[in-house]
Every structure is written in structure tokens, then in C-alpha cells.
Amino acid sequence: MAEEQELLTFGGHLEVFRQMLFRILWVSGLLAVLVFCFKDTTWQLLLAPSEWDFVTYRWIEGIVQQWSTGFRFEKWHVDLIATDLSSQFMSHITMAIYLGLLGTSPYILYEIFRFVSPALYENERRYSIPIVIVVYILFIVGILMSYYVLFPISFRFLGTYSVATKVHSTITLDSYITTFVSLTLVMGLVFQLPIIAFTLAKLGFITSDMLTRYRKHAALAIMTLAAIITPPDIMTLILVAIPLYLLYEISIRVVVRISKTSFLDNQEVVEKDVHSNHPV
């Protein structure tokens, strides 16, 4: 009888999980269809970083012109081509799905949290809500960092680089989309470094002293990671390495705060034990 009850409970969880997946797929698919229909707006946003007058360059010009009036970036142009018959159509579908999932990511996180939360204790639920919010915020910041800084500067440098005046660059649409998606996703993931440090510190695997002691080693590891995940140019590597190192420093502050909080909690437990053993 107990086995039947356990089986029913497991089956009930599977049914709830199936309904959750169905809702996520339905909402994501609906948004993907909307993105697919608004083709002009979608691809205007996607291809904007490949233009010489992208907003990032205007920001840089505005900052530099405060000290050097008349500064302007030279106009440049890189042709995008499609070499396969179906490449444009398939790229359109791929980006519609990608943007659909990205747009529904808050709803996906909400559904996953609602599915998992009944199994959490009250204190775990109290911690998990802020963590989920911070994870999403850091993910979006990483994507924006890639879209407005890393990808346009990397594309400008690599797309206009030429070994000789006779050699001209024509970038395929597949190469553009692959680099765009991979770089944005990677930046969204690496921006989770403070959350990873928070989790490892909670589990007792790392301490603030450990992170401080190995700061130089971490800087070398960050430079290596930046060289792996970025296109092969020194400017993009530096632009990735700097925010990653800042995130490492933020992670040290997070771990220090966790250590202080854990110490205060332990002190409170000790005081409660003392008062319970020595009543007034």
C-alpha cells in the first residue's frame, strides 16, 4: 500500500512537471512566433552592432569629445552574405527561437521555482528567491555587456582587419549569428561568478582568505578564460577580462559577508544555549 502511495506521489510529480514544461513551451513558442513575424524590427536590432554608427560608438565619441573636440570614428562597412540557399530562413527561425526563450526567461524561472519551492524548507525558500532574482539580473547584465560592448568592438576589429588592400572581408550570416549567440550566452553565464562563490562559500568549500590568497592565480585564470571564450583579438580579451576580474573582487566581498553572517548566527546559537543551560 505504501509503495502504491509512493508511486502515485511520484506520478503526480511527473504530471505537474509535464504541465510545467507544456506551459513553458507554449509561452516560449508564442513569443518566438511573434518575434518571427516582426522580422524587420528583430533583424534591425540583431544587425545594429555591425554598423559603424552603433550607439556604443556614439557614446565613446561623446565621452572623448569632452577632451578632444571633433573626434569621430571613421566610417566602415562589412558586407554580410548568405552562402547557402536556406541559410537566411534557418537563421531567422533560429534567432526567433533564441529570442523567444530569452524573452520568456523570467516566466521560465518562475515556473521552475514554483515547481521546486514545495520541497524547500522555509529558510531555503527565503534565500532562494533573492538568489534567483540576482542570477537573472547578472545574466541580463552579461548579455547587455556582450551586445553593447564586446560584440560590436570585436566585430569592428575583426571585420575590418585586412592583411593587404587587395583582401576584403565578407562575413557569412551564419558566422555572424554563431558568434553573436555564443558570445552573449557565454557572457551571461560567466557573470554568475558571484553566485557560484556564494554557493561554494555556503557549502564551506571556499573562504574569503582563500580567494584573497589566490588573487594573482585568479587573474591569470581569468585572462586564460577570456582568451578562450572571446574572438582572437587583444582588445576583446581585455574588455572581457576586466569585468570578470571585477566580478571576482565582488565575489570576495560576498564571501566575506557570508562569513560574518555565519559567525553572527553561530554566536546567537551559543548565547541561546548558554541561557537555556543557566536560567535566571
Image: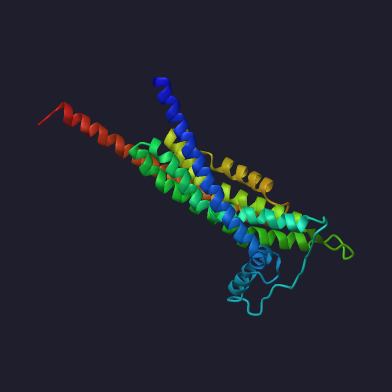
Q: Nearer the viewer, residue 31 or 159?
A: 31
| Quarter occupied by the C terminus | top left
**Which residue: 46% across, 29% down?**
10
Residue 257 versus residue 179 in the image, above or below: above
Spot the residue most to the right. 166
Q: Quadrant of the N terminus?
A: top left
Taking the view exactly as shown, the residue that stands out farthest to the left is: 280
Residue 198 position, x and y percent, is: 45, 41
Locate residue 194 relative to residue 178 in the image: left or right. left
Q: Position of residue 108 (x, y in %)?
A: 51, 48
Which of the pair 202/111 is nearer the observer? 111
Vertical relation: 143 (above or below) 224: below
Would you say residue 127 is visible in this rendering?
yes
Is 53 situated above or below 111? below
Instruction: Examine the image and state in which quarter residue 254 appears.
Output: top left
Asked which colour scheme the image uses, the reply is rainbow
Evaluate whether residue 212 shows in this view: no
Q: Quadrant of residue 9?
A: top left
Q: How many marks?
A: 0
* Residue occupying the point 53% across, 51% down: 105
264 relative position to 179: left or right: left
Q: Residue at x 77, y 69 (%)?
A: 77
Q: Residue at x 64, y 67 (%)?
A: 41
Q: In the shown orientation, is residue 190 left or right of residue 157?
A: left
Image location (x, y in percent) of residue 104: 53, 54
Say whether residue 101 is left or right of residue 78.
Answer: left
Image coords of residue 207 (percent x, y)? 45, 37
Foreground of the two, 152 or 263: 152
